[in-house]
Amino acid sequence: MSEKEEVKGLPVILDKKTALPLWIDQRVFPLQYYIPIKRIENFFKGLREGKILATKCKSCGRLFFPPQMDCPKCKTRDMEWVELSNEAELVSYTIIKVKPKTFGHYEDYIIAIGKLKKENINIFAWLKTSDPSKIRIGMKLKLVVSERLPEKYLVYEFVPAEDL
Ligand SMILES: [Zn+2]
């Protein structure tokens, strides 16, 4: 029995590894996660106030962004909230033209790593610019809170300092 014959009459394929027949369920379920955020709720409150918040371990001083409430080094939950500065420098970027299905409704977008000057940590975020041809490694960026369309959700992202 060849794979071709099976596909013709039935939603059945042969497993690539084992060659055993597999029934393809015809129901497709959208998958949406609900992630508990109670312990990092301050982060979202911060976005609404235009602030980008990280957590800092009170014991070793390590910064966590995106924020987390446990320090893996100190095995402690004794964290404080700190507002990040916004001056950064572009370390690396990629322009996304071929998008994952769930991001298909966005125009081409740029994902970037920027190093915050003051904190000396790397942040991974979208980089929004009116002119991608002006992007240069090392260019000055600002980390800002903005509204992502069409969802109208608050997000943090980089913009070139000269665009502000
Ligand atoms: Zn620590």
Image: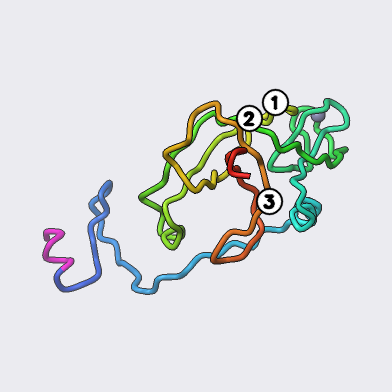
Q: The disc labelled 2 sits on which kind of residue?
A: Lys
On the rendered structure, is 34 left or right of 31?
Answer: right
Tell me the quarter of the image containing the C terminus.
top right
**Front-lying residue, 81 or 33:** 81
Distance (Cα) linking label 2 and label 1 = 6 Å
Q: The disc labelled 1 sits on which kind of residue?
A: Asn
What's the mark number on residue 94?
none
Crowd band around label 1 with a 10 angstrom C-alpha radius: few (<14), some (14–19), many (20+): few
Residue at 47% x, 68% y is 30
Distance (Cα) linking label 3 and label 2 = 17 Å
Mark 3 / mark 2, whichever is N-terminal: 2
- In terms of image quadrants, where is residue 147? bottom right
Distance (Cα) linking label 1 and label 3 = 20 Å
Tell me the quarter of the image containing the N terminus.
bottom left
- Kindly indicate whether the residue at mark 1 contacts the one at mark 2 (C-beta within 8 angstroms): yes
Q: Which residue is mark 1?
A: 120
On the rendered structure, is 38 left or right of 111?
Answer: right
State which region is magenta: 1-7
- Please say whether residue 30 is one of the residues in the magenta stretch: no
Residue at 46% x, 36% y is 134
